[in-house]
Image: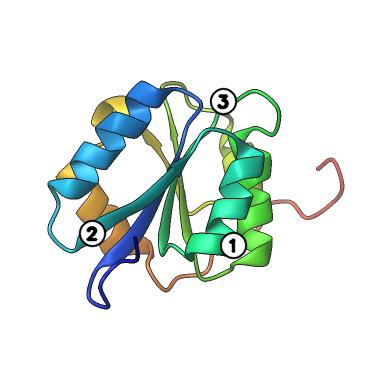
Amino acid sequence: MDAAPNEVAVLGVDDQPIFLDVAREVVAATPGFRWVGGARSGEDAVAEVDRLHPGLVLLDVRMPGMDGLETARRIADGHPGVVVVLVSVEEPPAVAVARSGAAVLVRKQEFGPSVLRRLWSTYAGRKPPADPDPRPGG
């Protein structure tokens, strides 16, 4: 299920099927975006990014096994052009988000079509933020 050339391919990643359903509905309701798949774990997300080549990944922070922060790091390292957006009910420390390689964190409660459009227009084509403190453990 590839996105048309003028559409942004979106992959959702969450261990909770309800958020994947909501995210798929938001993407379907937003012109210019197309849902290309969902994954329920960090490991599956990395494999799906390799297979589907999305432009945008909506990635839950808290998942069993490989969490969203580590998953974001792996996606950003392997696919630097992919915009990774962390989504969570809670906000992890800003340093952890910055070190993950994700573009930004969005609260699940605020996610909708206008946020999706704003995220893409703001972060598409940009490099992720630099690590605020490159010292190990810093």
Residue 107 appears left or right of 138: left
Which of disc 2 and disc 3 is earlier in sequence? Answer: 2
> Between tags 3 and 1, which lies in front?
1
Residue at the right extreme?
136
Q: Residue drawn 23% across and 47% down?
A: 27
* Helix, strand or loop at mark 3: loop
Residue closest to the far bottom: 5
Q: Name the residue: 41% across, 64% down.
A: 55
Calculate the distance from the C-alpha at mark 3 to the C-alpha at mark 1. Answer: 22 Å
* Crowd around label 1: few <14 · some 14–19 · many ≥20 (10 Å): few
- Which structural element holds mark 2? strand
Q: Amino acid at mark 1?
A: Asp
Q: What is the crowding at mark 3: few (fewer than 14 residues within 10 Å), some, or many (at least 20)?
A: many
Residue assigned mark 3: 62
Mark 1–mark 2 distance (CA, rounded to whole Å): 19 Å
Using the numbered discs, state the Cα–Cα distance from disc 3 to disc 2 in whole angstroms.
25 Å
Q: Given this view, does label 1 or label 2 mark the residue nearer the observer? A: 1
x, y percent for residue 4: 25, 72
- Residue located beneath label 2 in the image: 33
* Disc nearer the start of the sequence (3/1): 1
What residue did someone put label 1 on? 50
Residue 95 in view here: no
**Location of the N terminus (image quadrant):** bottom left
Marks counted in the figure total 3
Left or right, residue 13 beside residue 29: right
Amino acid bearing label 2 = Phe
